[in-house]
Every structure is written in C-alpha cells, then in structure tokens.
Image: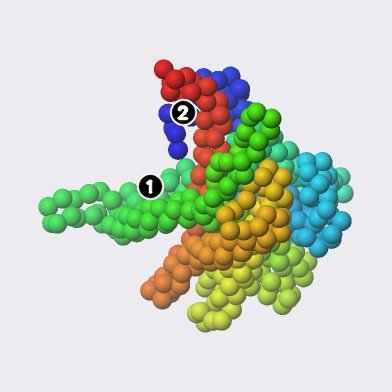
Amino acid sequence: MHFKTIFKSLKNKDMLKRVLIILGILVAYRLLAQIPVPMGDASTFKEAVSNLLEKSDFSNFLNLISGGGLASFSIILVGLSPYITGSIVVQLLTKAIPRLEELSNDGESGRRKINQWTRILTVPLAIVQSIAYIFILYQSTISANVATEFVPTFNDWALSVTAMTAGSLILMWMGELITEQGIGNGISTLIFASIVSQLPTTMASLGSALFDTSQGTLNLFGWLDIPVNPTVFWIIFGFAIAMIIVIYFLVKLNEAQRIITINYAKRVHGNSSYGGIKSILPIKLIAAGVVPVIFATAFLSLPALVGQVITSVNPGNEFGESLVTIFSAPSANNFAAMYPNGITGQWFIYPAVYFVLVFAFTYFYTSIIFNTKEIADNLQKQGGFIEGIRPGVKTADYLSKVVNRLDLFGALALGLIAMLPFATDYVFILLTGAPLGLSISGTGLLIVVTVALENLRSVDSRALMITYDDFKNELGS
C-alpha cells in the first residue's frame, strides 16, 4: 500500500469529495440505527429484544450486522439481509436460466437490468422479514410476561412494516451510493461499519471485567501487583495473540494470487508498429473475498427465522424448535439449554452446513465475477495470448482449470478460517463444559479484515491514478 500517495491524493478535490461522501453516508447510517420503529412503547420492545438476544445466537448476528439496530429496535432492524438474499436468488437464477445468463453477459446494460430485478425482489423480502421480526418480538413480550397494555392495530402494523421496509431499502440505496464512489463495495462497507460500531461496547465490557478486582489482582513474579483481574487478563492476552496470528494469515490469504503472463503479438500498421510486449493477469486465491461468508450466514439465518416464527405462533412445536436448535450456532448462552446431555452429533450440524455453504458460495461467486470465456475473448480481440495455449476456447479452458484449482484451496482455507471459532468452542466445552461463544466474533473478524483490505486496495488504486501525473513529473525531473 502506498499510504504516502493516499494522503497526497486527498488534496485532489474529486478524491476528497468521494471520501467525504462515504463518511457522510456512514454517519447517516449510524443515525438511522438510533431511530426506533414507530410501534407502541419502545422500551417494552427493547426489553423483549434483550431477552431474544440472550436466547438466540442468530439474533446476536443480526444485531451485529445491523450495527445494533436490533438491540435499539431501530428502523434498520431488518438491515441488508433482504438485499443479500435477493442477490443470491437472482444470481442463482442467472446461472439456471440461459436467457438471464445471456443478459448478464450483455455488458453494462444487462447488468443494470439484473440489478434492477434484485432491487425489486428486495422489496417483498423486506416486507416479509419485517412482519416476521415484529411478530416474533411482540410474541416475545407476551411469552416473557412483560407488562404492556399495547395491542397493535392494523394501522400500527402497516406503519411499522413500512418503516422497517423503508429502512432496509435506504440501506440498499446507501450501499449502491458507496459503490458508485469507486472505493470498495458498498454493501460490504456498511456491514464492516456495523461490526466496527460494536467495538466500543465490546471494549467497554472487557475493560469493566478486566479492572474488576473483587476476586483478586494479578501478581507478577511475586514483586509486581497489577490491579486487574488475573483470569480475565490472561484470557484477553491469549486471544489478542491468537487474533494477531489469525489476522496475519487472513492478510496473507487475501493477498495471495497466481500471476499468468500474457504476451501480445507485434503488429505493424503503416510505418509504425505496436504490441510485442508482455503483461500479467493476476488471479487472486480467494477472488470472491468475504462475500461467501456473508452469503452463507444470511442463507443460514432463514431457517432459524422460520423456526422462531413457528414457535411464536405455536409454542412447543417440535419442527420449529428443531429448526431453531439446528440452525442456531452454539454459544455460551444457549449451550446448556440446547444440549443438556453435552456434545451430541446435532452440535456439529450447524458448523458442517456453514462450512459447506462457504465452500459452495466461494465457487459460485468466483464463477460470476471471473468469467473465463469473456476474459479469453477479450484477450483474443486485443491480440493477447498465453504462451503455449491457443487463443479462444483453449485459453478459456486453461483459465477455468487454474481458477478451479485456486478455488479449491481458497474455499478450503476460507471454510477452515470460518470454522476456527467453532474449534475454539469445542476446546472450551471439553475444558469448562460450555463454549466461549466466539462464533459470531470470528465471522465478524473475517469480514472486517477482508473488507478493510479490499477497500484499502481500491483507495490505493484510485490514489495512484490521481497522482500519476505528479509521479511522472517527479521521475522526469
């Protein structure tokens, strides 16, 4: 990264404008997270939300990616989940229906039509999820015997669902505005901001636990007494070391790439000649980035949501309870209730399905963003070829073979990294009888690191483009 060039590029009005627009959108996003849903007494629903967060790890993840929108019963409670689900459905249909695949390959106009259909599909999904969440929360207030005289009318439901649906669509619009600025993917950036916004609360909780000396203080070598909780200190220290190691390998995996040399044939036009040069085609090890993790988590959240709706309508329903149990990640809060007999085969269902989905979505999304046939056609039109490989179909086959091999290792690496928190939980179950519950934190760390690197790379590329003339002048002088 050329950090000096990035800071220098901020003197450019266009670059500064883009950065300020993105920062302004993120500030507006955080303000939206504080606007409550207009339905009854907000404090009553917040109490129901806190009970729901204690029972469900899925709810904790929803709260994480909505930037605390669930905990504050905000209009962005639904978040970006409908848009992500809509994107998955449309992209699956694009691969399944030849007409849509032709449209996606039809340049910018085709992609715009597909994006428009994704936006249209987002609306009904947002409405359905808004109704489901409000219904679950309202039933939670009743089942928890929370004192409330509020009985929602049809107008209350209509107003609340409209507000939540509008909040989800506003987030979708904000994400697209960020993408238009050319500095990273907007949806990933909003999820990144949501996770980072929860860090101050987490740090405050860790700080209060660290400086709670009611159970003693940390004594080093018998001569230095530090006023911190010794158990919490060593846990934080151990996880800090582990986090640094994981971040290091995440950066290495994210930056790893296969370089393919491209040769361009020499051409003579009149008295001038051009071509006869070499270039490179870099193919990333994990070209899909963090999208497979986001897709897999969003996909896994749907069965848990359906299960919660069923149990809210019909308490004690075995099918609904099974959906919630199977598709809720084991955590310190729910482990004792969900697995009273300790670890059983059922405990491994969620991690196994999660791994398979991450693996599958890595292949799926890479095939969308890296179209080998289109790249081979463009190389052939420009007179480019890979040494020893015939242009056209053979080049596309060769690129597909290379990408599939990279995807195999990249998908396994991404899946195993996503499994690290579950492995940690397993160790703590054996040691203490309960998991530590870092599954969501591990997913959050993966998203934060990958999105930060992608956005830094986008900023670096734009900064180099803006300051190119200055750099050329410096070389000339």
Say which residue appears at 54% left-offset and 35% top-offset: 461
Instruction: Name the quarter where the C terminus is drawn.
Output: top left
Q: Is residue 370 above or below residue 279?
A: below
Residue type at mark 2?
A: Thr
Q: Residue at x 64, y 66 (%)?
A: 360
In depth, the one of 145 and 316 nearer the eye is 316
- Whether residue 140 is visible to the viewer of this picture, yes or no, is no
> Would you name the residue on which mark 2 appears?
5
Which quadrant holds the N terminus? top left
Residue 308's x, y, as percent?
A: 71, 65
| Residue 214: image location, x then y, percent | 30, 55
Q: CA distance from mark 1 to mark 2?
A: 37 Å
Q: Are marks 1 and 2 in contact (CB under 8 Å)?
A: no
Q: Quadrant of residue 353?
A: bottom right
User: What residue occupies the far front of the structure in this picture?
Assistant: 271
| Rendered position, 266 above or below 299 | above
Q: Please, what is the three-letter code of the amino acid marked with disc 1?
A: Gly
Q: Secondary structure at mark 2?
A: helix
Name the foreground residue: 381 vs 451.
381
Residue 213 falls left or right of residue 292 = left
Q: Residue sitting at 50 percent across and 79 percent down?
A: 342
Residue 422 appears at what percent x and percent y?
A: 49, 68
In the visual, does 217 lie left or right of 106? left
Going from the N terminus, do you reach mark 1 or mark 2 first? 2
- The residue at which mark 1 appears reads as 207
